[in-house]
Structure formats: structure tokens, C-alpha cells
Image (cartoon, rainbow, N blue to C red):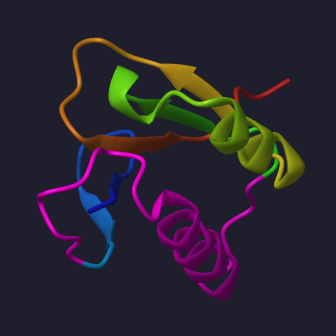
Amino acid sequence: MVNATNQRGVPIFVGDVVAGNHNDLFAILGQFKKLVCWCIGAGMALKGVVVNMDKGFDSRFLRRFCFRHGLMPRRSRRLGSFVLLTPAPSP
């Protein structure tokens, strides 16, 4: 399950429940596609948004997906299975 919060930790997106007998990357692209569609539908600008993920989500194909959609993936060891969306720094 992919959960997204804003920079204050408030949940803004909760993905679908996925069977627990798989690793973290099982069906992750589908979950991220839903997250991106939801954010765009909510009027959020994704360019430059930092995505903090735990190391279980770190993969070449997920990083590539993030970069293609203007997201900046960053691995965080302190987070659980959450994805934190942080606005891009102001110029």
C-alpha cells in the first residue's frame, strides 16, 4: 500500500491494499500511477516535488517513473512504508 502525506505528515492519498505475501515493489507502478493521477486531478504541481521512500521502494524502474513525471525520488531510512510528498524549494 502506498500512502502519501504532505510535508506536515497529513495523509493526502491512500493507495489500494496489496496482499502481504509480496515484497514492497509488487504492483508499485500501478499504485504510483494512481497517486500521480490523483495529484494532477487535485491540481497539485508535481514538477520538483521530492518523494521520500523507504529502502524497500528503491528500484531503478520506480526512480525512472518518478523522474518522467517530474518527481524527485529520495530514499529515507527513517520512514516506514510511506511516501512523503514535499513541495519543491522556492527559488
Residue shown at 62%/72% (left/top)? 33
Residue 68 in picture, x, y percent from top left: 88, 50
Asked whether 19 or 13 is in front, the reply is 19
Whether residue 16 is visible to the viewer of this picture, yes or no, is yes
Asked if residue 69 lies left or right of residue 5, the reply is right
Left or right of residue 85, residue 64 in this image: right
Q: Quadrant of residue 80?
A: top left
Identify the image quadrant of the N terminus: bottom left
Query: Which residue in the rendered view is the most extreme toward the left?
Result: 20
Write down the region rendered in magenta: 17-46
| Residue lying farthest to the top in this orientation | 77
Question: Does residue 56 appear left or right of residue 50 in this picture?
Answer: left
Q: What residue is rendered at 24% in x and 54% in y?
A: 22
Query: How many numbered dots are placed on residues in this image?
Result: 0
**Residue 52 higher or lower than 86, as above or below:** above
Question: Is residue 71 something that shows in the picture?
Answer: no
